[in-house]
Amino acid sequence: MPSVLGLLEAREKKVREEVARLQEEAERVRAALVEAESKLTRLADARVTVAEVLAEPPAVVAEPVASAVTGSVVPHRDEGMEASVLPPDYQRIMSVLESEAGREGMRCQQLAAALGLQAVPAKVEGLRSKAKRLVERGWVLEVRPGVFTPSGTPADCRPPFDAGPGGRS
């Protein structure tokens, strides 16, 4: 027959294991509670901020630039227009091209490096696309294939046409 002390020790061991399991579960629940409370605080703050913004009188909305291409965020350059009308990515490209190094002309790999981007094909091609768009809108000149410089004035920003045989004049 088992001893009373042996039975008590076995029972105590079993209860200790249950306490340890419940303590682990309580820690997990406490961590989940802290995370949920954090989310709740962020959502409540966002709701208050949105309510404040919506309560303010509407700001004056600037009229779109008349020379902007439908669906484009890059307007055609007109006399007196500053690069500040361009989206931030294009402003950064313009600032690099207008720097001392860019005035001589830059290839897209050089432009990527100057912007702090990795010169991987995806980044370089994205920059090439943006530079070409700036050429089309009169902000940048492509002085040689793949070499871009800022244009001086809107009049001299149109790409030259080949007037040779079969070319446009």
Image (tube, rainbow, N blue to C red):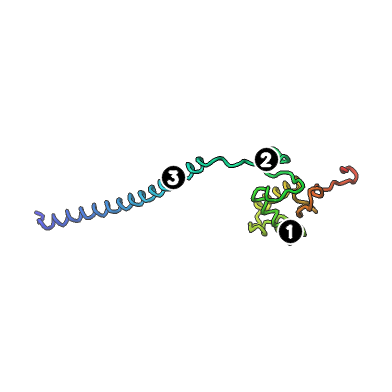
Q: Is the C-beta separation of discs 1 and 3 under 8 Å?
A: no
Relative image position of residue 106 (x, y in whole percent): 74, 57
Nearer-N-terminus badge (1/2) = 2
In the picture as drawn, the residue positioned furthest to the right comes out as 165
Instruction: State the residue in front, 57 or 31.
Output: 57
Question: Which label is found at residue 102?
Answer: 1
Look at label 3 and name its amino acid. Leu
- Rendered image: mark on residue 64: 2
Q: Which-is-in-front pick, marks 1 and 2?
A: 2
Task: Name the secondary structure under disc 1.
Answer: helix
First-in-chain label (3 vs 2): 3
Could you say which is closer to the camera, residue 4 or residue 23? 23
- Mark 1 → mark 3, Cα distance in angstroms: 45 Å
Q: Amino acid at mark 2?
A: Pro
Percent of width and height locating residue 99? 72, 59
Q: Quadrant of residue 120?
A: bottom right
Q: Are the residues at dot 1 and dot 2 in contact (C-beta closer than 8 Å)?
A: no
Quarter of the figure that contains the N terminus = bottom left
Cα–Cα gap, marks 1 and 2: 30 Å
Q: Nearer the viewer, mark 3 or mark 2?
A: 2
Q: Image check: 161 left or right of 58?
A: right
Q: Which residue is mark 3?
A: 43
In the picture, measured across the screen, residue 95 lies left or right of residue 12, that is: right
Residue nearest the viewer, comparing 22 with 69: 69
**In the depicted structure, whether residue 80 falls above or below residue 98:** above
Task: Give the amino acid at mark 1.
Answer: Gly
**Residue at mark 3 to residue at mark 2: CA–CA distance:** 34 Å
Give residue 146's position: percent from left, percent from top.
76, 53
**Would you say 86 lies left or right of 8 here?**
right
Which mark, residue 2? Answer: none
**Front residue of 55 and 47:** 55
